[in-house]
């Protein structure tokens, strides 16, 4: 099951929950059980690093100024 991130729009409390996609949003226990909102979270799967130590992107484009292109 995926991990979803939620935030309370009233007090800013954040939570992470492992739940099914169609499960209901949790209530915020910090500010009176108001429903929290699911936020879009970034994830990284199978990322590897190039010779410069930075994560490879696609076919590993050049890293930038004063760095050699990834091999």
Image (cartoon, rainbow, N blue to C red):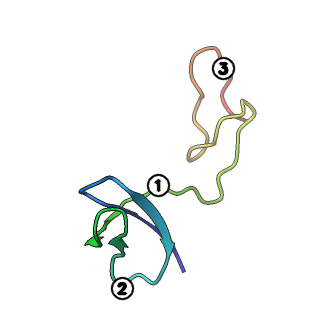
- Decide which of 42, 31 is in the foreground and name it: 31
Answer left or right for 28 relative to 9.
right
- Tell me the SS state at disc 3: loop
Q: Is residue 6 left or right of residue 31?
A: right
Name the residue located 68 percent from the left edge and 22 percent from the top edge.
68
The answer to which of 17 and 49 lies nearer the viewer is 17
Most foreground residue, 54 or 8: 8
Element type at mark 1: loop
Of circles 1 and 2, the one toward us is 2
> Of the numbered discs in the image, which one, if any, rests on residue 67?
3
- Read off the residue under disc 2: 22
Q: Nearer the viewer, mark 2 or mark 3?
A: 2
Residue 60 x %, y %: 61, 40
Q: Residue at point 57% right, 55% down?
A: 44
CA distance for labels 1 and 2: 20 Å
Residue at image x 41%, y 58%?
14
């Amino acid at each position: 099951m995926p991990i979803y991130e939620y935030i309370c729009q009233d007090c800013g409390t954040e939570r992470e929950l492992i739940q099914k996609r169609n499960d209901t949003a949790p209530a915020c226990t910090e500010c009176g059980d108001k429903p929290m909102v699911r936020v879009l979270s970034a994830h990284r799967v199978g990322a590897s690093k190039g010779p410069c130590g930075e994560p490879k992107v696609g076919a590993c484009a050049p890293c930038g100024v004063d760095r050699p292109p990834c091999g």
